[in-house]
């Protein structure tokens, strides 16, 4: 069986082997089919992703903690567990930002998600972006 045949078969399953604009159209079609309950869940996750982490950020800051880079990264990499969590979140945030950059069908307005990811948090920006992208097409 040829490689192109395998690619076509796999693309039908999940679109992984599609290239360029074909993959973007496939991904957009997958996102655009989101039901109202799924969109509601994404919005709820975005709100929870804003409130919960920032509850702890406010507690940290009100307890004398700092967002200054030295203190912040010192705490983020204080032990192997916090290092693993920090690296996991930053790698996921980087991958999400690459996905936003590649999502050219969303137009130039998509770039709001990048500063929101690093300024507010991935747990807020990612579900909010998916909610935004799953909005019904306006005609």
Image (tube, grey):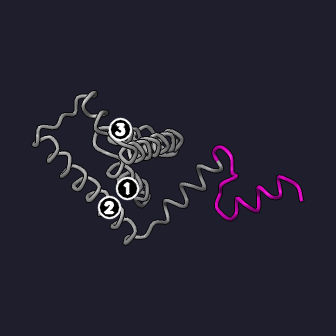
Residue indicated by mark 1: 127
Q: What element carries label 1?
A: helix
Image coordinates of residue 128 in percent, x first then y, are 35, 53
User: In the rendered image of this protein, does residue 80 appear above or below residue 136?
Assistant: above
Q: In this view, does 108 lie to the left or right of 41?
A: right
**Disc 2 + disc 1, Cβ < 8 Å:** yes
Residue at the spot of label 2: 45
Q: Where is residue 16 in the image (x, y as percent from the top left)?
A: 66, 54
* Residue 18 is inside the magenta segment: yes
Labels 3 and 2 touching (C-beta < 8 A): no
The residue range painted magenta reads 1-21
Q: Nearer the viewer, mark 3 or mark 2?
A: 3
Q: Label 3: state its secondary structure.
A: loop
Mark closest to the chain's N terminus, 3 or 2: 2
**Residue at point 31% right, 61% down?**
43
Mark closest to the chain's N terminus, 1 or 3:
3
| Mark 3 residue crowding within 10 angstroms, few (<14) / some (14–19) / many (20+) | some
Q: Could you give the CA–CA distance between mark 2 and mark 1, rounded to whole angstroms?
A: 6 Å
Can you tell which quarter of the image residue 80 is in?
top left
């Amino acid at each position: 069986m040829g490689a192109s045949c395998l690619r076509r078969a796999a693309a039908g399953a999940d679109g992984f082997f599609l290239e360029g604009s074909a993959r973007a159209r496939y991904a957009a079609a997958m996102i655009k089919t989101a039901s109202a309950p799924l969109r509601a869940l994404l919005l709820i996750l975005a709100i929870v992703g804003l409130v919960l982490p920032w509850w702890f950020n406010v507690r940290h800051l009100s307890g004398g903690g700092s967002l200054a880079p030295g203190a912040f990264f010192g705490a983020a990499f204080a032990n192997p567990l916090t290092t693993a969590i920090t690296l996991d979140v930053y790698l996921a945030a980087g991958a999400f930002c690459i996905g936003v950059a590649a999502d050219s069908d969303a137009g130039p307005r998509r770039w709001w998600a990048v500063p929101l990811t690093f300024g507010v948090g991935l747990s807020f920006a990612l579900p909010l972006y998916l909610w935004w992208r799953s909005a019904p097409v306006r005609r």
